[in-house]
């Protein structure tokens, strides 16, 4: 898989720990593309001996250059043999050509329950600020396939996280992030195994459900329920 990141890379680390450094070595992170130099995700990749690439900076007079960015991404992902792309806190819009090439094979993780609290400008702490400002009692994590719009592709998996009375942004972000680190490797595993497919109508169908009713509960006081993964054949 190829991982695209813009931040500290704690979700990348969860993938590295399971696939590159852990027992699940049938899949692995083959390249990490950073949206700029000096980000934590690149340090984590290098520490795990994973090749890195740094996306070219946006032009001085234009916020993005989709054709150049598409060429860069496709060149690096294909050279690394990438079959699945994971956006783990990547803040740049994915060019149309890349979305089409990896349709159904590119996922993004978002720290709220989409379709609420997503879209342009809703990333990082801003997501949790908006959740708190709205007075939500429940938030969560969404993993979805990437489409040409921010945070709007077909939903693959979600997990709820409670919002407590005395939460501030940091407390909430920390609780959500712990769930992200549990959910993302399990969903990557399932997608990579081919257990998730897309209908013509653009909805996800799981051939082996990731969790049953008995295990679908919210995390409280640090106890993070784990998805029950179907065994690989
Ligand atoms: C995560 O909250 C993820 O959901 C969002 O960006 C953040 C990335 O955090 N898309 P990290 O860089 O993986 O620590």
Image: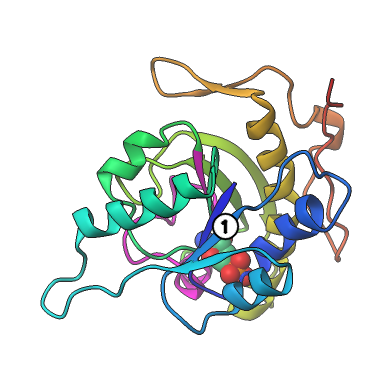
Tally of marks: 1
Q: In the image, what residue occupies the spot 84% across and 35% down?
A: 228
CB at mark 1 closer than 8 A to ligand 1?
no
Looking at the picture, how far across and down is residue 186, in whole percent? Answer: 74, 42
Q: In the image, what residue occupies the spot 52% across and 44% down?
A: 107
Front residue of 116/11: it is 11
Looking at the picture, how far across and down is residue 90, in whole percent? Answer: 46, 63
Is residue 163 something one can see in this rendering? no
Label 1 CA crowd tier, 10 Å (few <14, some 14–19, many 20+): many
Q: Which residue is mark 1?
A: 31
- Is 108 magenta? The answer is yes
| Vertical side of 113 occupied by 197: above or below | above
Read off the magenta span: 106-133
Ligand 1 located in image quadrant: bottom right
Tell me the colour scheme of the image.
Answer: rainbow
Is residue 183 something one can see in this rendering? yes
């Amino acid at each position: 898989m190829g991982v695209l990141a813009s931040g500290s890379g704690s979700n990348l680390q969860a993938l590295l720990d399971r696939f590159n450094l852990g027992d699940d070595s049938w899949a692995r992170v083959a390249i990490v593309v950073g949206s700029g130099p000096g980000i934590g995700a690149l340090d984590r990749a290098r520490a795990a001996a994973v090749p890195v690439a740094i996306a070219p900076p946006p032009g001085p007079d234009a916020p993005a250059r989709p054709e150049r960015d598409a060429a860069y991404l496709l060149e690096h992902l294909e050279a690394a043999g990438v079959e699945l792309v994971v956006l783990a806190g990547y803040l740049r819009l994915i060019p149309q050509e890349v979305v089409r090439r990896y349709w159904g094979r590119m996922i993004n993780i978002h720290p709220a329950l989409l379709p609420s609290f997503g879209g342009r400008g809703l990333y990082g702490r801003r997501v949790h600020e908006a959740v708190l400002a709205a007075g939500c009692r429940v938030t969560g994590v969404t993993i979805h396939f990437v489409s040409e719009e921010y945070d709007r592709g077909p939903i693959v998996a979600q997990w709820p996280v409670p919002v407590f009375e005395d939460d501030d942004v940091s407390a909430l972000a920390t609780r959500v992030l712990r769930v992200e680190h549990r959910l993302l490797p399990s969903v990557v595993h399932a997608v990579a195994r081919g257990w998730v497919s897309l209908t013509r109508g653009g909805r996800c169908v799981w051939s082996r459900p990731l969790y049953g009713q008995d295990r679908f509960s919210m995390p409280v006081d640090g106890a993070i329920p784990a998805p029950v993964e179907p065994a690989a054949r």
